[in-house]
Amino acid sequence: MVPCAPPNQTDPASSASSASGSTTTTATSESPGPIPSSSFGGSAETHDRMQETAIRFEEALERRGKTLAEAELAEVVDLLQEASEAVS
């Protein structure tokens, strides 16, 4: 599991500004809350690709009627690879 910054406890829908001045957040139903792009570094373009990959991955899990905890590791790897390739 990848460690991440805890969500803002006062406003779960909050966002953060990156060094470039852009403001983005990422949250999925399985994530602890919005994850500011500044937590990971990288460009806004990189964050956008990562966010789109996460969304496509979660949608694929939903189509299979599974949560992340219910999916087998090989299935997760396959779905992440498919989502990543679709975004690239």
Image (spheres, rainbow, N blue to C red):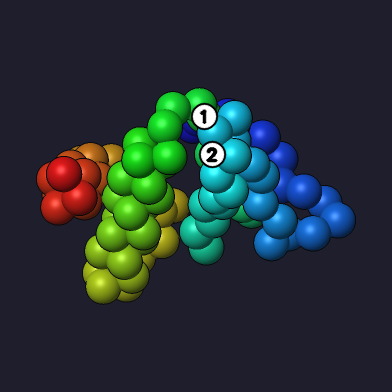
Q: Secondary structure at mark 1?
A: loop
Which residue, given by chain and number where applicable, does mark 2 sit on? Answer: 37
Say left or right for 87 vs 34: left
Looking at the picture, which amino acid does disc 1 mark?
Phe
Which residue is at a point 59% across and 30% down the rendered structure image?
A: 19
Marks 1 and 2 sit apart, C-alpha to C-alpha, by 6 Å
Say left or right for 65 vs 9: left
Percent x, y for residue 88? Answer: 16, 44
Asked if 29 appears above or below 77 in the picture, the reply is: below
Say left or right for 14 vs 38: right
Contact check, label 1 and label 2, Cβ < 8 Å: yes
Percent x, y for residue 62? Answer: 33, 70
Which residue is at a point 35% across and 36% down the rendered structure image?
A: 46
As drawn, the label of residue 40 is: 1
Which quarter of the picture shows residue 80?
A: top left
Which residue is at a point 59% across and 39% down the rendered structure image?
A: 21
Percent x, y for residue 28? Answer: 50, 59
